[in-house]
Structure formats: structure tokens, C-alpha cells
Amino acid sequence: MGVIQVALLCFVVGVLGAKAEQLSTKECENLGFTGLALCSDCRTLAEYVKDQELVSECLSCCTEDSDDAMSKVVYSGAVLEVCMRKLVFYPEVVGFIEEEKDQFPFVKVQYAFNSPPKLIMLDDNGEQKETIRIDNWKREHILQFLKEKVKPSSDI
């Protein structure tokens, strides 16, 4: 390995080793990082993208990985937010709202102008914890996700 490659490797390891200051969910969403991004995803991003600022922002919005970190994350409720005018472009979301939503009394549908389809995950206090874009999700993926990840506070 050449001197430049070793220096670059040390730089990347140093940057990725130190996790940046955590940003709020809203700040991360404004930067384009939505959903449950894992820090390992940011490290993978760093391998392909040489924009240090982008990698740093990713690290500021990620969740540390563990063997089963995602399986332990549960929420007390959710808001499915979507623009009513854009619903025509998301038949899977429409199908969920019209035919499946009643199975989930802890999930509210909220219409917001120009909003892409997303699930806003809520904690026990009704506070927003995560925002997950569901533009390309199939109805069965929405169902499975909500069954696994949303447990009303009395069930937790």
C-alpha cells in the first residue's frame, strides 16, 4: 500500500471512528437523511462518496448498529403522512389506507401538502422519534413493519 493510500485510510478511519454530534430528526430530514439509518450505512457511503461533509452529516443522523439493534426498536404509535394530491402516484399506500389501516388504531393518517408518503414514528409521549419514507413500499411491507415495530404503550 502506498503512502497516500495509508494516509487516506487513516483519515477515513479517524473520521468514521469518531461519531459526529447527533442532530435532531428534523435537521436530519432537512439534510435528506430520513428513516432508520445505521452508522454502518454511513461507513459504506464513505467508501463510495468522497464528500467529507456528506459523510459527516450522515454520521450525525445515524443510529449505532448492534447485532439486533433494529429488532429491539419499537414505537407506541405512528402517523402516516402524505399529500392527498399525490396519493394517485402511490397505489400501495392508498390500498393500505383504504383496506388495512383499521387494523392499526394507533396509526393516524395525516394529509400534508406536498408531503411524500412517510411514517412518523412516535414514542410513549406522542413525540416524533423517527421519520421513514415509504414511497416505494408495498402494502405488505407497511403491514409487516407496523406489526413488528408499533406496539401501543399498554403492550410494551
Image: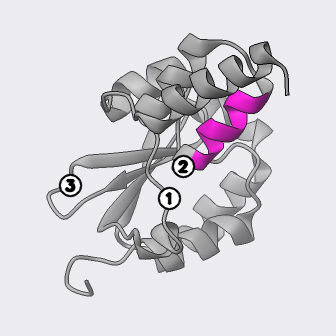
Distance of label 1 from label 2 (alpha carbons): 6 Å
What segment is highlighted magenta in the picture? 40-47
Task: Name the residue tied to disc 1.
Answer: 65
Q: Is residue 108 left or right of residue 87?
A: left
Residue type at mark 1: give it: Asp
* Mark 2 Cα-neighbour bin, 10 Å: few <14, some 14–19, many ≥20: some
Q: Quadrant of residue 89?
A: top right
Q: Position of residue 5 (x, y in %)?
A: 78, 20
Question: Which residue shows up at 75% across the image and 21% down it?
Answer: 49
Question: What residue appears at the point 53 percent right and 73 percent down from the top-left corner?
Answer: 67
Placement of the C terminus among the 4 image quadrants: bottom left
Label 3: few (<14), some or many (≥20) within 10 Å?
few
Please name which of the two marks, 1 or 3, marks the residue nearer to the observer.
1
Q: Residue furthest left?
A: 125
- Left or right of residue 135, residue 112 in this image: left
Disc 1 secondary structure class = loop
Residue at 34% across / 69% down in the picture? 106
Residue 113 visible in the picture: no
